[in-house]
Amino acid sequence: MTRLGAVTFDAMGTLVAIEPPAPRLQQSLERRLGLAVDLGHCEAAMRVEMRHYRAHCAAARDAPALAALRLECSSLLADALALEVSGAELLPSLTDAISFYAYPDAQPALERLAAAGLKLAVVANWDISLHDVLARLGLVSSLDAVVTAAAVGASKPDPRPFLVALERLGVEAALCVHVGDDPVTDVAGAEAAGISAILVDRSGRAADSLRDLAELATRLGVPA
């Protein structure tokens, strides 16, 4: 690609992933509250919680709103588990259940593109805590911007998060490529903002996709 100036990335499923939350929740419930809960029950309850979080994370635009969303999620989790505990009592165990890690190919890919002079940003459907998560995982040093749905007030595939990223990077849409794992929120969303997109499918099933980020620089024509 000629005259490429910037690359934006999705977060979850592209740069980072989550440890299986149900076993962590089960262990925390036993340790903190002395409650023995079936693993399958924990899995079903975490699915309820995560669906609610994804639907409402864009509302967590500041610290009080994020705290309120987390308490709401823990209350839903308590209901789904049918436990006689409050959301506030269950919140520490929900926090224990959520643990992110960076894919091994994420940091090398970011560093290689940054070394080539490209501007980099993350554009994600996430609450305002994303910058802190990326910092803990060692991924922010190569980034020029982190744009969340919560900060913008709109979630991908709405083009607004992408447009905010372009403004912060000072790059035109035609000179940017977005990399993400979702055909709708990432590919269609980026294209709605006039940005070309590359799909990452770590399962290797999707046609014309990248299996991992180790292939990204080559796809973009970035020299070794």
Image: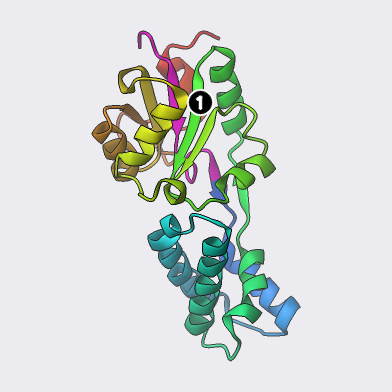
Give the x, y percent position of residue 191: 26, 32
215 w.r.t. 100: above or below: above
- As drawn, is 42 to the left or to the right of 27? left
The residue where tag 1 is placed is 120
The kind of secondary structure element at disc 1 is strand
Q: Quick one: label 1, few (<14), some, or many (20+) residues within 10 Å?
A: many
Task: Say left or right for 132 vs 166.
Answer: right
Q: Is residue 23 above or below residue 103?
A: below
Residue 210 visible in the shown view: no
Residue 181, image x and y in percent? 40, 40
Q: Decide which of 205, 117 is in the foreground and name it.
A: 117
Where is residue 114? Give x, y as percent: 57, 19
Q: 222 left or right of 154?
A: right
Left or right of residue 121, residue 159 in this image: left
Asked if 29 appears above or below 129 in the picture, the reply is below
Q: Is residue 187 rendered magenta in the image?
A: no
Work out which quarter of the rendered image holds the N terminus and state it. top left
Task: Please name the residue shown 55% across and 9% down the image.
Answer: 224
Residue 109 visible? The answer is: yes
Q: Residue 144's quadrant in the figure? A: top right
Tell me which segment is drawn in magenta: 1-16
Q: Is residue 4 magenta?
A: yes
- Residue for point 40% across, 14% down: 4
What type is the residue that disc 1 sits on?
Answer: Leu
